[in-house]
Amino acid sequence: MNRFWSKTASNINPYVPGEQPHDKKYIKLNTNENPYPPSPKVFEAIRRETSADVRLYPDPDAVGLKNAIARFYEVDCDEVFVGNGSDEVLAFCFPTFFNPGDTVSFPDITYSFFPVYSRLFGVKYKTVRLTDDFFIPFDDFTSSARGILVPNPNAPTGLAVGTDMIERLLRRFPDTLVIVDEAYVDFGACSSVPLIKKYDNLLVVQTFSKSRSLAGLRVGYAIGNNGLIEALERVKNSFNSYTIDRIAQKAAEAAIDDKEYFYKTLKRVVNTREYTAQKLNGLGFTVIPSKSNFLFVSHKDIKAEEIFIKLRQEGILVRHFKMLRIENWLRITIGTDDDMAALIEKLKAMMI
Ligand SMILES: Cc1ncc(COP(=O)(O)O)c(C=O)c1O
């Protein structure tokens, strides 16, 4: 800290992303990236867009990309907002929908960016405590919150709920904005997007980073009633007109249009997840039933931190959160079959 820092810069507690190491090549199972490359059509789009036209600004409204997302979800173009990763979309939600001093509510164990954004934008937050088996106690949300944030599936647990639970929340609190973060929904959960036609208090946030293998290009989006989207556009256009570059817009458009590749890749990840869960069970791990591209696991005899450190030494990165209630758990991203076989081998060796 020095004398030029604002109160905001001094008081915030920044989010710590999973490690992107430089020291050597690891099997990276720590940041929920997709182990498979994006659709070949993405590379064609990138090649086409890589021209002298990069001297021109991108389309500030990203109309081509919004139309492609709208086609995929059968919604209208003005019901779609796009941003530089869903992190940015979530960040924009705070000044767009919540006033400083308002209260938002989210689970105590969830995406750790939620409390960070709350503090950054001067929004108070109240957490609801997950049950001991990590379920979100939906009945514990109260009407005092101006906004409710729920990832579905939740992170880092991977547990999902049916859209009936989300719909009950929307009905119970018609004057509270419910933001459903569906970063991992494609890996087996049910999307709440169809509910946006019925509920003007629902905003669904999704990303190209996980199921469409584009984490490195940073594209996320929100789908909701056009009144909500208009407000997001107002804030975005007061901050940065060009949040998504020309190449990322075209690449994401190609990715969402290639449905065949999308479903094929999802199936591979889901099959590997189920196989890995079974193997981990066999090694004495408790494995939370996951609808995402990661597994949340705990071992009956060996401490999570010890496993994390040993795996790192062996060239495998997983995620360990030094947080109350989950300090003995690890989040393991689903890699290729070979990645997971290597993981199982290293774990087996540890158990001897
Ligand atoms: C629950 C959840 N939401 C949102 C994100 C952000 O994804 P991105 O900014 O890459 O779209 C992540 C990333 O890991 C996540 O775990």
Image: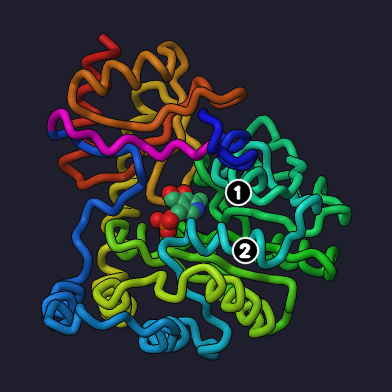
Q: Residues within 10 Å of mark 1 (few under 14, many from 20)?
A: many
Q: Main secondary structure of the magenta part?
A: loop
Q: Residue at x 74, y 65 (%)?
A: 177
Instruction: Say left or right for 154 vs 70.
Output: right
x%, y% of residue 231? 65, 77
Region in magenta:
14-24
Q: Amino acid at mark 1?
A: Tyr
Q: Residue at x 42, y 61 (%)?
A: 85
Q: Residue at x 48, y 65 (%)?
A: 206
Q: Residues within 10 Å of mark 2 (few under 14, many from 20)?
A: many
Instruction: Say left or right for 259 vs 38.
Output: right
State the scheme by which the image is colored: rainbow
User: Ligand 1: does it lie within 8 Å of the C-beta at label 1?
Assistant: no
Q: Quadrant of residue 71?
A: bottom left
x%, y% of residue 1? 51, 28
Residue 260, visible in the rendered structure: no
What numbered label is drawn on residue 93?
2
Residue 268, visible in the rendered structure: yes
Q: Which residue is mark 1?
A: 117
Does the residue at mark 2 contact the one at mark 1 (Cβ under 8 Å)? yes
x%, y% of residue 60? 41, 82
Q: Residue at x 52, y 40 (%)?
A: 157
Q: Earlier in the sequence, mark 2 or mark 1?
A: 2
| SS at mark 2 in the image | helix
Towards the viewer: 226 or 195: 226
| SS at mark 1 in the image | helix
Instruction: Say left or right for 263 vs 73.
Output: left
Task: Report if residue 155 lies within the magenta region.
Answer: no
Q: Quadrant of residue 169?
A: bottom right
